[in-house]
Each structure stands twice: as C-alpha cells, then as structure tokens.
Image (cartoon, rainbow, N blue to C red):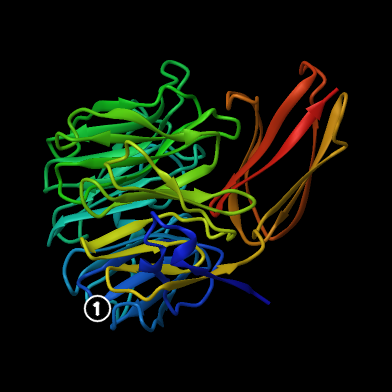
Amino acid sequence: MYKYFLIAILAFPYFSLAQWKTTDIPLASRYDDVFFLDKTNGWAVNSIKEVYKTTDGGATWSLNFKANSYLRSIEFSTEQIGYLGSLFTSIYRTIDGGETWQDISDRIPFDFAEGGVPGACGLSAPSANTIYMCGIYSSEAPPFVSKSYDAGETWTTYDMSAYATCLVDIFFIDDMEGFVTGCDDRESAKNGGIILHTTDGGESWENVHETKNEGDYVWKIQTPDTVNFFGAVASNPGTPNITFAKSTDKGLTWTSKIVRSGWDHIQAIGFKDAQTGWTGGSSQERTVLFETHDGGDSWEDVSVEDQSGFNRFFMIDGSTLFLTGRQVYKYENDANDEILLNIEKEIHQLSVYPNPTRNQINIELNIGQYTRTHLNLFDTEGKHLKEIRTAILGEGLHQISFSVEDLAPGLYYVALHTNEGLNYVKLIKE
C-alpha cells in the first residue's frame, strides 16, 4: 500500500510547489526518461521495461510497449520516427509513431568490445533523420557515441575510451555540434564528472568541463534556450558540497557552482529559462529537490518526504515541463494549489554487518529486479577507496564478504549504485 502526502503551497513560500503535479501514470521503481512532441503527445519509459503514451498532456497514460529489458531513454525525431535505449543491449526504433517497435541493435557496429552495443543512456535527435546516442553509466562496457544520419538505417560508432570512463547523457544542437556527459576516472586523468563538446559530428571531442572529484558524474545536461546550459552533478556519499555545472556562452566554457553544503544523490536538472530551475534526485530519507530564481546563485530546499528519485526534466516551453521519478510530474503555471506525491520503499536493500567492525564485513544485497550493481567503499569526504564488487545481479538475496582489516579506524560509506539509483550504509571501523 502506498502512502500519500498532500503538501500545501503555503509550506514553501518561495517554491511554486503547486505547479508540480503528479500525473496519472502507474507507479514504477523509476521512470528514467520522458519525451513530448508537443503539449499533448508524449511518452515515458521506466525500469520495468514499459513505454507509456499520453495524448492529453499527461492527464491519462496507456501502456504502449513492453520491452525485454530496463528502458533508460526515449527520443522522437519526427511524429513517426522514434528511438528507445535500454540498459541491456537492446535499441528500438519505431517508424509508425510508436504503434510498433523493432530492435535494431544488430545494425549498430560495436566491434571494440564483446557482446555488442551495451545499451543507451542518452539519446538526442537534432533533426528528422539524425539520431545520436551514448552509453553507458556503467564501467563494465567501453563508453561510446553512435550516430545515424538516415533515421536509424545505418550507424557509425565511436569508442570514447580516450575521453571518458562512462557516458550518461547527450544533447546535440544540430547535426554537427553537441555535448556528451559522464565521468572520467581513468588512471591517467581522474577528472571526475566531465562534459565533452564536438563541432564535427563526433569525429573529435574537446573536454570543456571537469569536476576534478573522482567518482563524480555529470549526469544530465539541459538547456532552456541553447545559450544557457546546465549540468547535474552526481557525487559520492560524503562529498562536502552539492554542485552543478553552468555555462552562459552556448556551452563553450563552464563553471562549477554550489547548491548547498552536504551531500545528496543528485541526478536531475532543468531550467525553464535562464533564471528559474530545479536540481534534484534522492536520498534514503526523502526526495531531494532544490529551486532557484537567480540562475543558480542561490537555492531553496523544497524537498519532501518521498523517495521519488528524480532523473529527467523535459521542457516543452517555459510554462510546461515534465519531471520523472517514481511517476511523471508536470509543471504548469496555472496548476492547482496542491501536489500529490507517492512514497514507496526502495527497490533494492543494502545492509552491512557487523557494524562497527574490526576486520571483516558481510554485505547483503536484496535486489528487487535485474540490475547492474556497483558496490564501492568511500571515505567521509567522498573519496573512492575500494571497489568491492561490480556485477549484473538478478532478483533475490546476494551475500558478499569483504575485508576491511587494512582500513584505519573511522567512518566510511559502503555505497551501492544500480540502474535505479544509489543506496549507502555508514560503516564504522574500530
């Protein structure tokens, strides 16, 4: 059974919380992406392999397609041609407005690693016949960018290992100029979260921003006007500040700016104009959402007791935006004075014992659905210390023993990063 909180606008005088409303879409562990052709026709994809479609601006949704794996991204280049990216090898295309979807992953060359294309975290269609994709957030597969100039019939793929460890999001202004984001924790670089820029269709790339904090991702990139660009920064537990990346010159130069001190798991960012925007994600206690009205110079914490795991903002225009989490949320200037949000238990559970410990810990992962898992150890400043385990795991209980004998006494974080988000446990070493 789900609980609901009804939140009045008076509780947050600086945040137009009344303008974000929950749409009537079935609850999922996570909706990763949403795309609208106009104010009425849109699609949303989720972690339980589903595509939902709306023809009335999100008032109602119907199940459109069931894929064979976790769906991460969706993009349409025309009313008829669209693409789906999954996290486990399948890439889909429709040429009939979503009536049918075909797996086209066998058309995409990926000869620099075994197993073929690993999936697609990000999609961008700057014109009717052009589609770009990138992936994936996991270091299990080489980072890549693929493109097609003939509506997905033929593809070119670039190995991005010289620039990054993982790639998450992509945005192209036109057929030749665009950006890709992710992380670069190669031994030779340790750049943390990165933003790469190309002006020749991906033939070459320039690193235009790096966070310089190992383990960071620039998780999402967004622009309301192709002049002002914003990047959401996902960091490790213990990192001292929540930050975001900002550019005011069409993405050519970037600065890091602080949202607030302390740590939360941030993945989403979206601005409706150069001044008003939001960034957020989740923690283990609440939904994390911050709002700014001065271009990110100051932020108001408007978080609520909900574990929605915000991931993607999609802007139709300055008065209508959508945000994905456990459901899909809609922003309208003329919305009612209340918002309804769902609370649900995290889909994956992480426990560590004994805690405190001297030499050895036992880690239990209760996995709610098939997912990629990255289990790591961090110090209290967010510095990565050890990789405990990286694996694709199925539903059920998984147990791991791990030695911490060589750690100095103190406080640490054991963190589990999955397709659905991040869980962590504070570990005390005696």
Asked whether, in this view, residue 154 is left or right of residue 283, the answer is: left
Asked whether, in this view, residue 420 is left or right of residue 243, the answer is: right
x and y percent of residue 157 in the render? 27, 43
Quadrant the N terminus occupies: bottom right
Quadrant the C terminus occupies: top right
x and y percent of residue 14 in the render? 38, 54
Q: Judge whether 156 appears above or below 272 on screen.
A: above
Q: Judge whether 396 appears above or below 216 on screen.
A: below
**Would residue 361 be visible to someone looking at this image?**
yes
Q: Amino acid at mark 1?
A: Thr
- Of the pair 145 and 308, the residue shown nearer to us: 308
Residue drawn at point x = 11 percent, y = 48 percent: 174
Residue drawn at point x = 29 percent, y = 56 percent: 107
- Of the pair 90 and 356, the residue shown nearer to us: 356
Quadrant assignment, res 145: top left
x and y percent of residue 78 in the render? 16, 69
- Of the pair 270 and 366, the residue shown nearer to us: 270
Q: Judge whether 315 appears above or below 138 on screen.
A: below
**Would residue 92 be visible to someone looking at this image?**
no
Kind of element beneath mark 1 = loop
Asked whether, in this view, residue 395 is left or right of residue 239, the answer is: right
- Of the pair 220 and 107, the residue shown nearer to us: 220
Residue drawn at point x = 24 percent, y = 78 percent: 40
Per the image, the residue denoted by label 1 is 40
Badge 1 local density, few (<14 within 10 Å), some, or many (20+)?
A: few
Residue drawn at point x = 85 percent, y = 35 percent: 355
